[in-house]
Amino acid sequence: MGQSSRNIDAVVAGCIGVDTNVYLYGADIDFNVEANFSQNIDCVGQAGGYSSLGFASLGLRTAFIGSVGRDWHGEHIRHELRRAGIEPLLFDDPLGTHRSVNFMYRDGRRKNFYDGKGHMDIRPDLEACRALLSRARVLHVHLENWCRELLPLARQLGVVVSCDLQDVTSLDDPYRRDFIEQADLLFFSTVNFPDPHEAISRLRQGHPDRMVIGGMGARGCVLGTRDGVRFFPPVELDAPVVDTNGAGDALAVGFLTGHMLEGHAPEDALLRGQIAARHVCAQRSGQKQPITSSHLDELFHRLSRTG
């Protein structure tokens, strides 16, 4: 299929749900008392939610494949996707819409409690997925169990496959094996790999052209390519870090948009991803607005490593 018939820039596939973010007033939860006072905010989130909304905010033609329940949360997600101009392909989850509860600390860190409902047993409509993917340039996939069924479809159709492994604890994890084997690009959190050299080498093994991007939080990020491993410092913006939800997703969206869709050099695309992530971290849930293309361009030119 020619590029002219690919009228979707990015398809995001995976988890989407309504998050309840619990912002603590104190330094930690006091388990010695029954009641802790906090600010509790609901929003559309999880990796697929943040990623698809991020692509759309950059002005890209975006579609989303995922599951929701026939409940208030599912209807809210449908509304928010339509409002953002995202084309949805949503399957019914009989167990309901995904939920997460995130306990948010004052420095932006979080503890996440994730309820994936029926994602282990959902079977997607592969013909509908094939029709959607045939129009796409990039598939950015997350770790829902059914997402592995999309990987061979995307490869057959010549779609670039990107996968976010998230906070992987073992590189031998059998659950992630299909995703690691079939992705063109991999993103992961280095939280369990303080020195990510070996992890990047393992993730690139057998894939000489593969790029691997590791988010390192306050330490910046790392890029592994055939030319070696390069570390990049964090991006500094005026606003403080208040909420790290969606940061890794913004890093991936910024990089994929910059490098795979707009043709920027990898190091420049990575800076764009870092800027997008830092922008997200400066906003609390309920107020979060993914960065726009014009704002990203402005900050990139100000902070450009090559400028």
Image: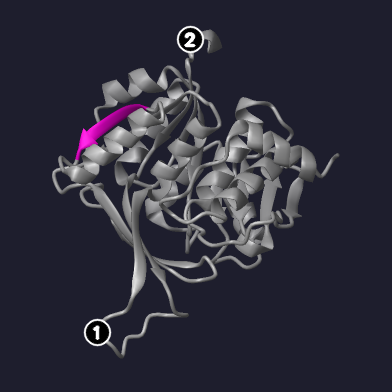
Q: Amino acid at mark 2?
A: Ser
Percent across and percent down for residue 232 are 74, 54
Query: Is residue 60 in sight in this rendering?
Result: yes
Compared with 268, 242 (above or below) is below
Residue underneath mark 2: 5
Give me the residue at 26% from left, 32% from top.
Answer: 90
Indicate whether residue 11 is drawn in magenta. Answer: no
Instruction: Identify the element where label 1 is drawn.
Output: loop
Residue 88 spot, x, y in % from top left = 32, 28
- Callout 1 amino acid: Glu
Q: Nearer the viewer, residue 134 or 288?
A: 288
In the image: residue 237, left or right of residue 254:
right
Magenta highlight: main SS: strand
Residue farthest along the right direction in this orientation:
307
Task: Look at mark 1 in the image and give the residue it sits on.
Answer: 34
| Circle nearer the viewer, 2 or 1 | 1
**Is residue 51 depicted above or below 287 in this figure?**
above
**CA–CA distance between discs 2 and 1?**
59 Å
